[in-house]
Amino acid sequence: MIRACLDGEDAIKDQGQSYVPKPDGMTTANYTHYLDRACFYGAPEMTLRALVGLALRKDPVIKLPARLEPMRLNATHENAPMHVLIEDMVREVMSLGRFGLLLDFPSSENTANTVPHFSTFVAESIADFETSYVDGKKVLTRVHLASDEQYDGADVTYELILEDTLYKFRRFIRDEQKNRVEVGEEIIPVVNGQALNFIPFILVSHEGLRPEKITPPFLGLCKVALSHFKNSADREHAIFLTASPTPWVAGSITADKVPTAIGAGTVWTLPENTEVGMLEFTGAGVSAMKELMDEKIDTMATLGARMLSATMNRNETIDTATQRTRSELALLHGVVVSVETAINHLLRVAADWMSADADEASVSLSRDFIESSMDPKMIESQMKLYLSGVISRATMHENLQKGEIIRADRTMDDEKDMIEEDGGDVSPLIPRAVA
């Protein structure tokens, strides 16, 4: 349902009665027109686009050791760059609250230069999972993942399992009686000649990396959007039936005198004492439907973290509005933290597999969801603090990064090198007192 709402009006209408039941007594042909006239308000997709834009307002800072550098441009099994993987993860976790990330090697043609990659699984592909306590820690011990493979006309399911402290990979299908049928040989993945004692798979959610069941963040918003769509279908249908005035004729009229046409240039010749009039809709039912739909639009705006309405009240100061908006973006913060933690965890594992320095492998996502460019007065204050010896040059550099004056991924040494290239002076701005 969430996926269809995010895909938009055509996806909802393609599902027909799954989301909009056919009214009693309506023919199939009339139901088709009834559904076609309805308009889907794309609040879920608009809200998601706004939230993802805020979460990735600043580019992620990606640091990789030389051995893992190829992952920057080919991070996934589909050869997607690392920044595309991050955007996909943020979008999926934000909307459906679940995303699967598996660290793996290519299944064949490995060489000394081969590096690991991420295999990704959307929420619908994560069919089942189990957890157990191993050495006092709660870990995944079994995961079933839907695949795009087919065997004997049946869908193949991947099974990642931790059995006897060994990570194993299996494939199976279900026969017509729903019995499990194994496909191919069981595989025990080996890295550097050693089997793994954990499943290199992470379930990412907006509530952390715990694999417990969660409620998708967009569930409530999508339910209201569908309810609004049903109201739209009813309202458009009511207007279709009642909006056009309908002529009526009362009296004793022979069959050859019954009017068969109407409009300019058409003359009706009727018997004496015949009455003629127009039927027009005068009730308040359609107006009530409009009011109900407007209420649901307001509800969708509220559920969408106010991304669909103004974020600043008329009597609010900028600081007050900023603090209030930050509190409303708790979902963003949770998603960013979870996505960042998941990628960093598996990047460290990948570095360990490749005998690289794990401390050099990291991805950092910004928590500055609201534009906070430092104004000239604040820049001047930072300079005064530095000149007076209250803060160091490194602290001033960090503050200028937070104030969006210096790029977040540019170190102080990088900035010094650029100043030198421009012919500037990188020596202390004032001589320090010598004891």
Image: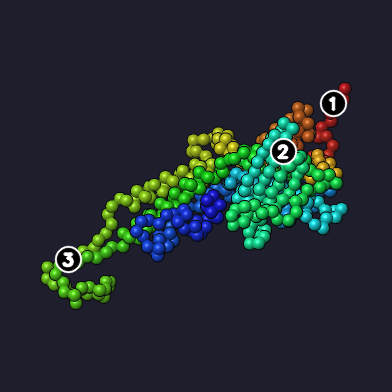
- Circle 3: is it few (<14), some (14-19), or many (20+) Cα within 10 Å? few
Q: Check whether the beta carbons of the residues at disc 3 and disc 1 lie within 8 A of each other.
A: no
* Residue 128 left/right relative to 310: right
Task: Give the residue pinned by disc 1.
Answer: 433
Task: Give the residue pinned by disc 2.
Answer: 400
* Residue 362 left/right relative to 130: right
Task: Give the residue pinned by disc 3.
Answer: 250
Q: Residue at x 27, y 59 (%)?
A: 280
Q: Position of residue 238 (x, y in %)?
A: 34, 57
Amino acid carrying label 2: it is Leu
* Residue 115 left/right relative to 215: right
| Number of numbered labels in the structure image | 3
- Foreground pick, 379 / 122: 122
- Foreground pick, 258 / 422: 258
Q: Residue at x 79, y 45 (%)?
A: 350
Amino acid carrying label 3: it is Ala
Q: Position of residue 54 (x, y in %)?
A: 61, 45
